Image (cartoon, helix red, strand yellow):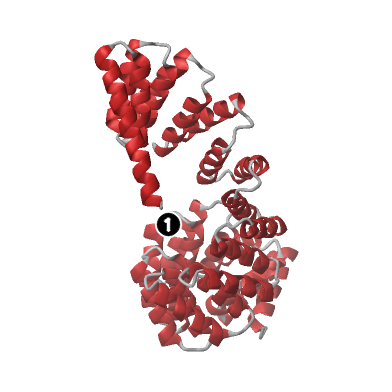
Amino acid sequence: MNGKVDGDHVAKMDKVIATCQEIVKRDPKNWAAYHDMGVALMELGRYKEAANAFEHGHDLSRRDVEGLHLAGVAYAELKDYDRAIASWREVLKVNPRHAASRFFLGKVYALKGMWDPAIHEMKKSLEISPEVKPPLPYLHLAEIYLTRGLLDQAVACLEKARDLAPEDPQTRLNLGAAYLDRRRYEEALAESAEAVQLGGNVASAELNAGMALKRLGRLEEAAAAYQRGLKASGRDPELYLNLGEVYLLQGQVDKAIDVWKKTLEVSPEYANAHYNLGVAYHRQGRMNEATAEWRRALDVEPRHLGARVNLCAAHAQAQDYDQAIAEWKPLLDLHKDNPELLAGLAELYARKGDLGLAVDYARQAVIAGPGHPRAQFMLGVALARRGEAREALELMGKASKSETFLKTQVLTIRTCLDEVTLKTLRREAEKGGHGSDLSLVSKLLELTASTD
């Protein structure tokens, strides 16, 4: 049936082209025939010929602004974006309120990564035609905003598109995803349900619904949403990945492992699935299998931060600090001047006992992130280990203004501050007589002794 319709359409367009060619033979200045010929050629995907026909018609009649606009569309289809832009700019010189040329100009600017001009032209298009249907300018403007990280503006555009075309499932789906990014979870659920009702992509809608439910703490409902999505598309690795994460949150580690193995059957090169599988094995104390999975994640995605950090932590736990440091250093190649990562490397050197490098990296962390609590605290720890108690107390005091922060540093405190260092800090605090120093040392001693 479709083949016959397509064949009939091709035949009809061929007839239009032939008729137009006969007309221009008799009347070479008939610009309307060139215009109609261009439209038929566009319908057949013969974009270069179409652009030539439109331009010829426009040369014969400068009134044919629409032909010039369509020439731009044809050039855009040929990915000759510069000529497309030139055509639409000419249209706008004649008619600055040509909404379609504004819209297409915005699309092409976006394709070229020219975000500000793209936003400007899309907005101009919408000023001219704010109630346009289908609401493509709103949808494309939303995509640009999402690319630029302007989530609130993207949501506003998608909401307007939904209001103009409430029966479009893809708009509902996109809006649900945007609500999810803005942590508007109940609204994300509502839009995902609408997308399913309207015949949208069930797998994607249920994925969004499951993620919203998980973040609302409704784990059983989240698992059910992912399972419904998998019934619709059993080859979607994201659904498997998220279902496994729900099982892990529920403490069902074996089920999580089974699901993530299934993820890797569907998508063997999925780094996050290898990473998650490693986390599950670690929960079960299967360290060799855990580290093997994290290495596989890095083989697939060398920039995978979680896998790299977990490998380092595993080596550090085994007191293999040289290997932990070797694993950590590539993180700094990927994330230069990151104070958290510099402080982490400083801690590894402190645990190893190389206090010179511990202080060096901790100072780099403080320089990279002035006022960064973890960087300040780690520099204080390294200096304390080196016997420079006064400066150490000042730095750790600045970092530890809240007891909550200190509790996050329990592992660092226990592994880096030995009994001798803590006694030195206490003596310095007593000598100085500052209540804040004495309180800090008391908290350090308490956390060191705690079994939590």
Residue 403 location, quadrant: bottom right
Q: In the displayed structure, does residue 319 sit left or right of residue 204?
A: left
Indicate the position of residue 364 as horizontal and vertical percent values. Answer: 46, 56
Indicate the position of residue 336 as horizontal and vertical percent values. Answer: 41, 55
**Mark 1 packing: few (<14 Cα in 10 Å), some, or many (20+)?**
few
Label 1 sits on a secondary structure element that is loop
Would residue 23 be seen by someone viewing this image from the given angle?
yes
Determine the residue positioned at 50% across, 57% down.
339
55 to 374, vertically: above or below:
above
Determine the residue positioned at 66% across, 56% down.
194
Quarter occupied by the C terminus? bottom right
391 to 83, vertically: above or below:
below
Q: In the displayed structure, does residue 280 sit left or right of residue 41?
A: right
Indicate the position of residue 282 as horizontal and vertical percent values. Answer: 50, 83
Which residue lies under the disc numbered 1?
A: 335
Would residue 431 be seen by someone viewing this image from the given angle?
no
Q: Nearer the viewer, residue 401 or 12?
A: 12
278 to 15, vertically: above or below:
below
Determine the residue positioned at 58% across, 67% down.
389
Q: Residue furthest right?
A: 435
Q: In the displayed structure, does residue 209 sit left or right of residue 115?
A: right
Residue 214 location, quadrant: bottom right
Give the amino acid at mark 1: His
Report the label total: 1
Indicate the position of residue 394 as horizontal and vertical percent values. Answer: 62, 60
Q: Nearer the viewer, residue 356 or 315?
A: 315
283 to 171, vertically: above or below:
below
Determine the residue positioned at 69% across, 59% down.
185
